[in-house]
Amino acid sequence: MNTPNRAPIALFYGSSTCYTEMAGEKIRQEIGETDVDIFNIADEPIATALYYDYLIMGIPTWDYGELQEDWEEIWDELDDLDFSGKKIALYGLGDQVGYPEWFLDAMGFLYHKMKKQGATLVGLWPNKGYDFETSQALTEDKQFFVGLALDEENEFVLTEQRIEKWCEQILNEFNFPQ
C-alpha cells in the first residue's frame, strides 16, 4: 500500500512530556529517516496508519495505568479500523520505580486493541533487567513485554542501547529489506 510520497514504515506516538516523541525520533533515526514517517496522534488522524503495512506505535503509561490523553482521545476510533495484514511493533514508556504496579500498562492495552483489530504484532522485549511489580504489558508467560520497554525516569542511560537492539529486531520481524 506504499506510495512514492510515503516511507514504508509509519511511527505514531502520543506524548505529553515529549519523552515518547524523543524515543520515536531516536527510533526513526536508528532505522533511517527516509524509511520512517513519524506522526503525533494529536495532529494526524489515526486512520492514516492504514496507508502503511509496517507500523510502530509509541504510548506512555500515565499515573495508575492510564492512557496518555492523546491516545485516550482516539481510543474508540481504533475500533473502526481494520489492521489485518499490518505488522505493528509497540514501544512504551513508564516509571517502574514510581508506579511499579502499573508499569507500561498502556502498552498492554494498545497491544490487545491492535490484536483485536487484526494486526500482526512483533517486537516482544525481554523483561529481564527491569524492577517492577506487575504490568498489563507482559506476555501470557510473563517472560516478555509486548513491545520495547523504556523508563526515561530511572534508566535513561539504557534507552539508546535498547532502541538500537530493538530496531534491528523489528526490522527482521517485519522482513524489511535492510
Image (tube, rainbow, N blue to C red):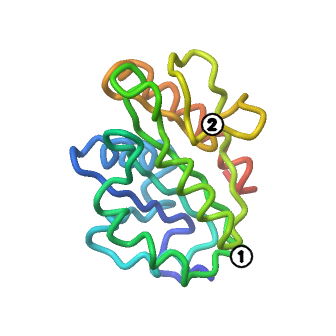
**Going by the image, does 17 lie left or right of 26?**
left
Q: Which one is earlier in the sequence, the residue at label 1 or at label 2?
A: 1
Label 2: which secondary element: strand
Eyeballing the image, is 98 above or below 64?
A: above
Label 1: which secondary element: loop
Q: Residue at x 51, y 34 (%)?
A: 149
Amino acid type, mark 2: Phe
- State the image coordinates of residue 70 (x, y, percent, origin top left): 30, 63
Which of pointers 1 and 2 indicates the residue nearer the eye?
2
| Along the viewing direction, whichever of 90 and 107 lies nearer the viewer | 107
Mark 1 neighbour density, 10 Å: few (under 14) some (14–19) many (20 or more) = some
| Along the viewing direction, whichever of 98 and 171 lies nearer the viewer | 98
**Going by the image, does 41 lie left or right of 115?**
left
Q: What residue sits right under mark 2 in the picture?
A: 145
Disc 1 vs disc 2: Cβ atoms closer than 8 Å? no
Rendered image: mark on residue 84:
1
- State the image coordinates of residue 156 (x, y, percent, origin top left): 35, 23
Residue extending farthest left:
17
Mark 2 neighbour density, 10 Å: few (under 14) some (14–19) many (20 or more) = many
| Along the viewing direction, whichever of 166 and 147 lies nearer the viewer | 147
- State the image coordinates of residue 143 (x, y, percent, origin top left): 73, 28
Residue 118 image-quadrant placement: bottom right
Eyeballing the image, is 159 above or below 30?
A: above
Q: Which residue is drawn at 69% across and 56% down?
A: 121
Residue 61 image-quadrant placement: top left
Q: Disc 1 to disc 2, how far (Cα)?
A: 22 Å
Q: In which quarter of the image is the N terminus?
A: bottom right
